[in-house]
Image (spheres, helix red, strand yellow):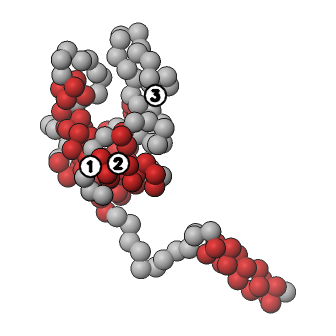
């Protein structure tokens, strides 16, 4: 019986390693991503969703004429924009960045969050993107 459990455990480890699910005891979570997850949950999730899913029908104006909060996962358009633009939107709000009378419910967080908190939120959001979207966004940001 004990031999059977050992073989089963070894087989499970082999399967997990084969699909890339293996714990690396030397790996450390990125502190910016961890901090960003917390800041996002407290400040961004009420509008953009706990799972970065955005508000329903986010591409169609609401009754007030403003667009609902978009998703920040790969189904949205955040990954189309550079770090500099995304950080400006977080700091100043969408209307201030777009200008020309554009109205948005997205406030600026410059008075509420530190620059480090804003960068951490962006690091968290970016950490959730699949490689294709992340690579595109790095290129747009001039990092790749």
Question: Visible in this render: residue 49?
Answer: no
Asked if 104 appears above or below 128 in the picture, the reply is: above
Give neighbour class at mark 2: few <14, some 14-19, many 20+ (Cα, 10 Å).
Answer: many
Label 2 sits on residue: 137
Task: Pick whichever of labels 3 and 2 is earlier in the sequence.
Answer: 3
Q: Is residue 111 left or right of residue 45?
A: left
Asked if 12 appears above or below 131 in the picture, the reply is: below
Callout 2–callout 1 Cβ contact below 8 Å: yes
Residue 64 position in % (x across, y down): 36, 10
Task: Assign a secondary structure to mark 1.
Answer: loop
Which tag is nearer the camera, tag 3 or tag 2?
2
Asked if 61 appears above or below 118 in the picture, the reply is: above
Residue 18 position in % (x across, y down): 64, 73
Label 3 sits on residue: 55
Q: Residue at x 73, y 79 (%)?
A: 11
| The N terminus lies in quadrant | bottom right
Task: Pick whichever of labels 3 and 1 is earlier in the sequence.
Answer: 3
Give the residue furthest to the bottom.
3
Q: Is residue 104 left or right of residue 112?
A: right
Residue 9 position in % (x across, y down): 71, 80
Q: Quadrant of residue 4?
A: bottom right
Q: Quadrant of residue 97?
A: top left
Label 3 and label 2: CA atoms lie apart by 22 Å
Q: Quadrant of residue 21?
A: bottom right
Label 1 sits on residue: 141
Q: Residue at x 35, y 48 (%)?
A: 137
């Amino acid at each position: 019986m004990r031999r059977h459990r050992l073989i089963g455990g070894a087989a499970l480890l082999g399967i997990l390693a084969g699909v890339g699910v293996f714990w690396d005891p030397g790996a450390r979570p990125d502190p910016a991503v961890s901090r960003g997850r917390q800041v996002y949950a407290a400040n961004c999730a009420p509008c953009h969703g706990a799972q970065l899913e955005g508000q329903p029908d986010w591409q169609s104006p609401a009754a007030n004429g403003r667009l609902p909060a978009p998703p920040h996962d790969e189904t949205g358009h955040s990954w189309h924009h550079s770090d500099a633009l995304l950080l400006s939107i977080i700091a100043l709000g969408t209307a201030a960045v777009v200008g020309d009378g554009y109205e948005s419910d997205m406030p600026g967080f410059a008075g509420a969050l530190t620059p480090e908190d804003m960068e951490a939120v962006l690091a968290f959001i970016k950490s959730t993107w699949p490689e294709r979207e992340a690579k595109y966004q790095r290129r747009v940001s001039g990092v790749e």
